[in-house]
Amino acid sequence: MSDEGILIDFGSESGPSPPVAGQTAGGSAAVGASQVFLGASDTSRKAETPPTNLLDDFGFETAPSAMPGPTGSYQDFEPDDEDMQKAAERVRQRRHKSKRKQELEEAAREAEGGAIVTIPRPTDLPLPPAPPAPVARPIPVEDFSDVAKHSIVELAGDDSYGRKVIIFSCCRLPTSKELDHQRLLGYLRQTLDQYVENDYVLVYFHYGLNSQNKPNFKWLIQAYREFDRKYKKNLKALYIVHPTNFIKILWKIFKPIISVKFGRKIMYVNLLSELKEHLYFDQLEVPQPVLEHDKRLLERNKPKSSSTFYRQSPDATDEQPRPTQQFGVTLEFLKIHNHGEPLPKVMQETTAYLRQHGVEVEGIFRRSANAKMVKEVQKMYNEGRTVNWTELGDPHLAAAILKTFLREMPEPLITFQLYDEVMRIHGELDGNDRLMATKELISGKLPELNYVVLKYLVDFLEEVILYSEENKMTAQNLSIVFGPNLLWSTNQAASLTSLGPINMFTLRLLEHHQELFIRDWGTSP
């Protein structure tokens, strides 16, 4: 065994290079791209690659005129400084040994006979394992309970076109000393983030804003700029109720920076009665001070026809509904006038069309339809005329009509009587107890006709969920859309606090429908 040194060959395709004679005893070995000489002290073991390989190793192109002469020197080859720097960098990189190489070299030193040990090329070495994927951590939700307790911002279900309605009440603003307006801005942004992906409207009750609770002008500018296109794109209407001269002054100030398109969405409402055409007024949680202020305005000024945009809804009447009426009547009325058929005509026709043309449409039930067409189709149904959905050819219109039908029922499908029970299930129970209580409520307490219609609707929504990859409407998304259309209270709007339990209850219906709907048709609770 010799301990002078070992020549390590990296496995060149042409095999190990032969030793070159004539190297001095104290010189270092000229090493090629595929060899490393270890601990060489014996001149008889030293080797170097041919000069041509050395040039290739440095990355120089060897022209015929630069071939070595008889003595091994290079003729007419004068590399510049940049070439030398590049060559030095390549050598440095090639001589950089990984941990794997070092282990093999240590093993080679212990080998007997100074044999040449072949080391795989770096490209042949196994790749190191991929680093573990980063663990997704949930983004913490900021607690705005100190702002939410004032009920300044509330959700009021859907409007007559199926769009979410969000209310901002100035009369509920505490003084500027009690409320941090920056936190109010954060809370408003957090609330809108839940709905800005869909069409929505804002109702701004201006009455109650005064010098004690009014945000400063700088805050107003900041608020407008922070609510960028993400928030403005799907905002379909901003109703400013009971505007004053202060609003008119603000409009003149902000007009240069407000886009024309956004300006068209702003609508002034002088009296609450003017909201009835576009919103379900009885679903709005109008603050008492606003109601009293509106009453004083009515007593002081009789309603005039000066408001050209709004008009009294033609359907607002105390007369008995016509036999063909489909919207705004009870399920019992529809059954009697539909030859005993328990399923409403509107639901059957819209779901039949959507099964064929709507379940794969992205954003179905989330996007609103043309408001004028919604009114026209409602009128056709109420007059008993045939609605040809294939000819209309608009899945979003059919989806909007279905939601409107549910929302305009005199009593929600899950009934007023069970509203408090739904709230109790969410607030007092959890896990399996919550599921069992829901099962008892649906199969044991829901009236028969409501049960039949609700089951039909949930079965259809299950078909929609099957295509969620295409339509982006998961069970959770559908529960957010349909929850406020299935249940609301008799004495208050669907506030943000009550909407959570309603949506969770709806989600439970969709995820466990086979366990919950076990009653046979025709079986009374």
Image: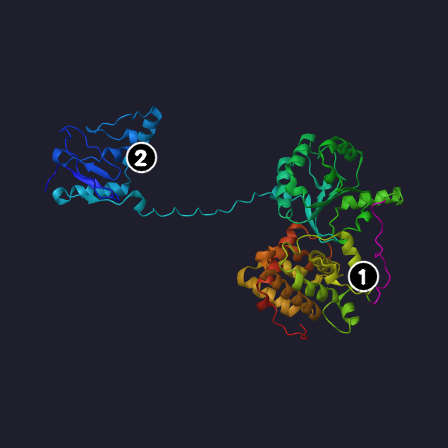
What label does residue 432 carry, if any?
none
Mark 2 Cα-neighbour bin, 10 Å: few <14, some 14–19, many ≥20: few
Where is residue 376 shown, x and y percent of the image?
80, 57
Mark 1 Cα-neighbour bin, 10 Å: few <14, some 14–19, many ≥20: some
What label does residue 380 carry, if any?
1
Tell me the residue at 85%/58% (across/down): 317
**C-alpha distance separating marks 1 and 2:** 80 Å
Q: Quadrant of the N terminus?
A: top left
Check if mark 1's residue and mark 2's residue have beta carbons within 8 Å.
Answer: no
- Point out the residue furthest to the left here: 1
State the residue in front, 110 or 65: 65
Q: Main secondary structure of the magenta part?
A: loop
Q: Amino acid at mark 2?
A: Gln
**Which label lies toward us, 1 or 2?**
2
- Residue 139 in the figure: left or right of residue 332: left
Residue 139 vs 511, above or below: the answer is above
From where the camera sits, is residue 473 visible?
no
Tell me the residue at 51%/47% (across/down): 138
Q: Quadrant of the C terminus?
A: bottom right
Q: Secondary structure at mark 2?
A: helix
Q: Does the stretch in magenta take in 321? A: yes
Residue 352 vs 190, above or below: the answer is below
State the residue in front, 424 or 276: 276
Count the labels in the image. 2
Where is mark 2, residue-wise?
93
Tell me the residue at 73%/40% (across/down): 261
Region in magenta? 308-323
- Residue 415 in the figure: left or right of residue 277: left
From where the camera sits, is residue 130 visible?
yes
Where is residue 25 shown, x and y percent of the image?
13, 29
Where is residue 195 shown, x and y percent of the image?
64, 48
Where is residue 468 shown, x and y percent of the image?
58, 58
